[in-house]
Image (cartoon, grey):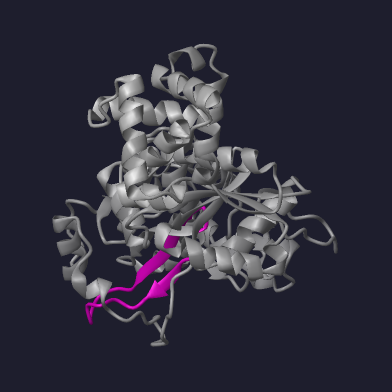
Amino acid sequence: MKLSMSILARYLRNYHPDCAIVNDERVIRGLRFLPEGEQKLAPEYVYFGYAGQFLSDPRYTDACIVVNRKSQMLFWNCDYEELLNGLLSAFEYYTDWERKLLEAAAQEAPLQELIDIGETVLENPMMVSSVDGDIFAGSALGGITGDPYWDETVQRKVIHPSILFNTYYNTKGELVADLTEEPQLIRNVYEKGNPVLMMYLKQDGEVVAYLGILQKYQNLTEIDLQLAPVLSRYLLRSAEFVSAEGTIKSSESILRGFLEGQPPGERAVRHLEQKGLNGPWRLAIFCHITRGDQMQKHALVHSLQTVPQIYFPFIYKDETVAVVKEEDCKELERLLKRTVKLSALCIGFSMASQEWENLPVAYRQAHFALDMAGKKAGIYRCEDFAFGYLREMFRAQELTLPLLHPALKILERYDRENHTHLRETLSVYLKKERNLLGAAQALHIHRNTLKYRLGRIRTLTGLSLSDEEELAYLRLSDWLSV
């Protein structure tokens, strides 16, 4: 783990160093002794020795010094060996802290466990909340900070409304339009309160939570600003973010879990609805007709993210997938046809659904549409091919033809021998849902002629043409035999 001079100064505070820190960045990865002479000092190391080796002023001859670039710490009346051991312990201490975070994250430990590890170094009160204000973990839960809004939040486990709707200003009074993945110091809602270090926790590029650190001890602010990003990386690997039962997830992570068969929990469904995905939707798979490389797929995801009708495009099983609301499908089809850079795509849509547990089925439906389209450029819906495919599947069965309704064979034989059209008449009559006028018009015959033919059909086959189960059998047989 890389350290800064402020971090080292905090660890060595009991030695009461005189600090002149001017470029306080986390760049230090090790300790070296001050060299003799005018040798250049590498910026990634902190150098230790007697100040007389580095400074010409005789007042500093007996002091010890720690140097990194233009930053210095002077130690007076300190035992050289003891201070050296303290410096070495500092590197070990912070490295061990990050190792504990790494081990907990690798085991998908609960968020609270990672916060507990985090607060051993970041001593200020901290908490993690969802984007809608629910508190999931915090180092000060159950404690008292003296900040009325923070303490009420801790007690209720929900962000105080005054914080949710308050305008953000930094400590200089400048408006803060938005938080970022880097920590920012935000002025407290409470007029006399200490500032709060705040930052986004993002998963798959989407804001899913906030990390807040109340600057109860403001002398630790610089260290908090440097170490909060380190902590946040591991928080995002806690159980709440990555496990199947996790309660804090990005839209992509939720959809990916649904595709893998994870049950759609109430919180996950509510999350998607808050993102605008309410009502019927379709899953879409986007495939370039000539390319299949990773660069193209990731570029395609980036392009689709700019299309308002497309929700959460991401790569799943080496394919670019996204969700589209049913009400947006027609507009999306028109847009895609007009967009030159998307004209080389073959796009398969699932059937419309409203239940998220159907997402794995929707994926197979969209894939089916792509396969049936032969990866030709265009937009294809599953239902465009489903009817014909099912019919061919039934026809391919060895027992299908022998099990068709026997009335059809009787009528076909009678038509051949008598040059009539009873088989066609029955087929049209069934397709028109037994509507006499509609069937007669489709056959271009008089209604009375149709009635006569239906009478002949009943006489020859014994059909009643009124029993619902028999009619369903006839429709299926007619459909498969055409």
Viewer-side residue, 6 vs 337: 337
**Left or right: 190 with respect to 47?**
left
In the rendering, at what x and y percent does residue 143 appear?
Answer: 18, 54
Image x and y of residue 283, in percent? 48, 48
Dividing the picture into quadrants, the one containing residue 19 is bottom right
> Is residue 145 depicted above or below 270 in this figure?
below
Residue 142 relative to residue 216: left or right: left
Can residue 128 be seen from the camera position used here? no
Can you say whether 2 is above or below 69 in the image? above
Say if 404 sits above or below 105 in the image.
above
Q: Is residue 71 left or right of residue 100?
A: right
**446, above or below 108, in the image:** below
> Is residue 56 in view from this perspective?
yes
Is 18 a magenta residue? no
Q: Position of residue 383 (x, y in %)?
A: 49, 44
In the picture as drawn, the residue positioned furthest to the front comes out as: 418
**Which residues are drawn in magenta?**
183-205
- Residue placed most toward the observer, 149 or 119: 149
Which residue is painted at 30% across and 47% down in the image? 435
